[in-house]
């Protein structure tokens, strides 16, 4: 291989050629023409190894991948774009030749057009404007929030058809009046006990005497035998001392220590069956293990998965979740 500098009529070339084939050049090359100036790496034996920049009037065109990687850093921009005066074209465009479409465009006003899916780790607050592409064409934006970045409570809708109840206490007063009226209307029959907690149609039957008192068919009444006052009554046996009373059990005995909780790998938005117990000293529910048939994991973060000790007279604090088993199959969504 050798270097050749050739100057002709209105052109000049500096290139590295092969001795046996002067038309084969491999390596750095400078080609100066009346309308262009090309400088870079050329390989006439390969169609994909070329990497050069072609300078023409008002523009520079690179025919290779560009990589910007300075050796040192400073306060300047790594890539700076500034249009000339009265510029009307785009500031930046990315074209896909396989799809014959522009994938990314930024105009002079900063309006950005993305022909694809934009994935962002974080988006600052601002205003999103959705413009339909044509009249009567619905256009929407899909926003997906991962469970690790937010906590949204589960929403459950309940239907209340109580237009006749404008005040909370009116229904309770109405039921109380109904019960009093029902008790006044229930009269016990002959030999039938009064039961105010049951309706008449719920009674087992009418307890009515079929034989009136004083009739011949009535059972004879046995009169007590006369007592002979001359015979002394038998002496009663000495019952002896009363048995000792048992010692009362302590009101709050020391509870047994709780078992070691399992290491639970919670999955977000999943139902579990779990066991929990209160570990607060002095609580009436301390050490009592409670079975929870359904426990929702919310976003999978343990600080949002809580079981509160809410029995009568309890402490009202969080319980310790001992075990959790994923329900299979999962309950249907409401």
Image (cartoon, rainbow, N blue to C red):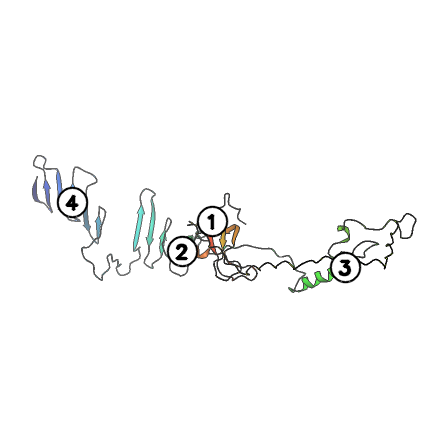
Q: How many marks?
A: 4
Instruction: Say if mark 1 contacts mark 3, CB within 8 Å.
Output: no
Q: Residue at x 49, y 50 (%)?
A: 274
Does residue 127 appear left or right of residue 34 in this picture?
right
Give the class, few, some or many, for how many residues have Cα within 10 Å of label 1's Cα (few <14, many ≥20): many
Q: Which mark is residue 149?
A: 2
Task: Point out the frontmost of discs 4 and 3.
Answer: 3
Front residue (pair 22, 197)? 197
Q: Which mark is residue 41?
A: 4
Name the element at disc 2.
helix
Instruction: Say if mark 2 contacts mark 4, CB within 8 Å.
Output: no
Q: Position of residue 196 (x, y in %)?
A: 75, 57
For marks 2 and 4, give the CA distance: 49 Å
Of label 1 and label 3, which has the lower sequence position?
3
Task: Point out the frontmost of discs 1 and 2.
Answer: 1
Q: Which mark is residue 324?
A: 1
Front residue (pair 93, 176)? 176
């Amino acid at each position: 291989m050798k270097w050749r500098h050739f100057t002709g009529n209105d052109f000049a070339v500096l290139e590295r050629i092969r001795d046996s084939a002067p038309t084969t050049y491999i390596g750095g090359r400078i080609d100066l023409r009346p309308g262009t100036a090309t400088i870079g790496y050329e390989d006439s034996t390969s169609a994909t190894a070329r990497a050069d920049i072609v300078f023409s009037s008002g523009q520079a065109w690179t025919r290779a991948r560009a990589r910007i990687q300075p050796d040192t850093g400073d306060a300047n921009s790594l890539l700076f774009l500034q249009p000339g005066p009265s510029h009307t074209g785009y500031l930046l465009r990315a074209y896909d030749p396989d799809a014959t479409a522009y994938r990314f465009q930024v105009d002079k006003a900063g309006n950005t057009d993305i022909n694809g899916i934009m994935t962002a780790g974080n988006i600052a607050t601002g205003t999103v404007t959705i413009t339909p592409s044509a009249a009567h064409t619905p256009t929407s934006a899909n926003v997906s929030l991962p469970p690790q970045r937010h906590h949204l409570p589960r929403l459950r809708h309940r239907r209340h058809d109580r237009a006749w109840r404008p005040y909370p206490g009116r229904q309770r007063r109405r039921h109380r009046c109904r019960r009093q009226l029902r008790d006044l209307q229930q009269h016990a029959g002959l030999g039938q006990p009064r039961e105010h907690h049951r309706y008449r149609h719920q009674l087992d039957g009418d307890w009515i005497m079929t034989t009136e008192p004083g009739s011949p068919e009535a059972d004879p009444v046995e009169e007590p035998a006369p007592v002979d006052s001359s015979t002394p009554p038998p002496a009663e046996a000495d019952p002896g001392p009363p048995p000792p009373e048992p010692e009362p059990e302590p009101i709050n005995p020391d509870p047994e220590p709780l078992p070691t909780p399992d290491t639970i790998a919670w999955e977000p938005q999943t139902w579990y069956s779990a066991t929990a117990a209160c570990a607060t000293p002095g609580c009436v529910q301390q050490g009592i293990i409670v079975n929870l048939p359904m426990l929702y994991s919310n976003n999978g973060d343990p600080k949002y998965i809580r079981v509160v000790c809410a029995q009568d007279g309890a402490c009202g604090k969080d319980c310790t979740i001992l075990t959790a088993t994923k329900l299979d199959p999962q309950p249907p969504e409401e």
